[in-house]
Amino acid sequence: MIRLGILFAAILGIAAPAPAAAQSPSPVMLLVNPKSGLKSVGEFVAWAKNSKKPLAYASSGPPAQRFGEALAQKIGIQSVHVPYRAAVQGILDLMGGHIDFAVMDPGAAVGQIQGGLVRALAVSGKQRAAGFPDVPTFAEAGYPELAGAFPGGKVTGKTAYARH
């Protein structure tokens, strides 16, 4: 795909597109079902560490998936990434209690967050997300290593993947 973009750029005499790895992804949010009773990252960490099973989570794409893996590794839990074709499917499963948490781009769940159907516990950016002044950053929640937008990372093989 990038090669085709470079070819068209050369033909049209414009700048070639930047490789995907060089592009800066947007921050992501840690989301839970409000029925869980979890209201902070600290509560989430305590709950997750007490879980007797790996926690299933959805993401809104590869950067969010890798952030979920980094989150699980940082707090010392086992997680299972459940891939969806669209973020809305993961949000619906979170609302229905079929998965334990989600890591999503803030825009993917804005309506559900504002409507109280899902709860945002923290955002990965260095600043609070626009439109969500009450959602702290991970740094504010005590996890500064998770504060920056997560552009990628190394998959360690410690996270299981569910396929459906």
Image (cartoon, rainbow, N blue to C red):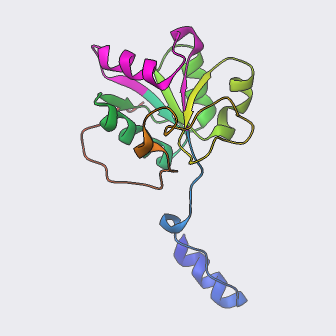
Q: Is residue 45 visible?
A: yes
Position of residue 102 measured from the top left corner of the image (x, y, whole percent): 51, 29
Quarter placement of the C terminus: top left
Q: Is residue 27 magenta?
A: no
Residue 161: x and y in percent read 34, 35
Q: Is residue 139 above or below residue 51?
A: below
Q: Quadrant of the N terminus?
A: bottom right
Q: Which residues are magenta?
A: 29-56
- For residue 32: magenta? yes
Judge whether 40 appears above or below 81 on screen: above
Q: Residue at x 44, y 34 (%)?
A: 142
* Residue at screen point 49% across, 16% down: 98
Q: For this rendering, which residue is in front, 15 or 51?
A: 51
- Relative side of 9 to 62, left or right: right
Left or right: 65 in relation to 17: left
- The residue lying at 60 percent from left, 84 percent from top is 7
**So how many labels did they put on this image?**
0
Residue positioned 55% across, 29% down in the render: 90
Pinpoint residue 24: horizontal percent, then vertical percent: 56, 60
User: In the depicted view, which residue is nearer to us: 37 or 59?
Assistant: 37
Q: Give the quarter of the image for residue 52.
A: top left
Residue 160 appears in the rendering: no
Q: Position of residue 58 (x, y in %)?
A: 49, 31
Q: Quadrant of residue 10?
A: bottom right
Foreground residue, 9 or 144?
Answer: 144
Q: Is 125 placed left or right of 83 in the picture?
A: right
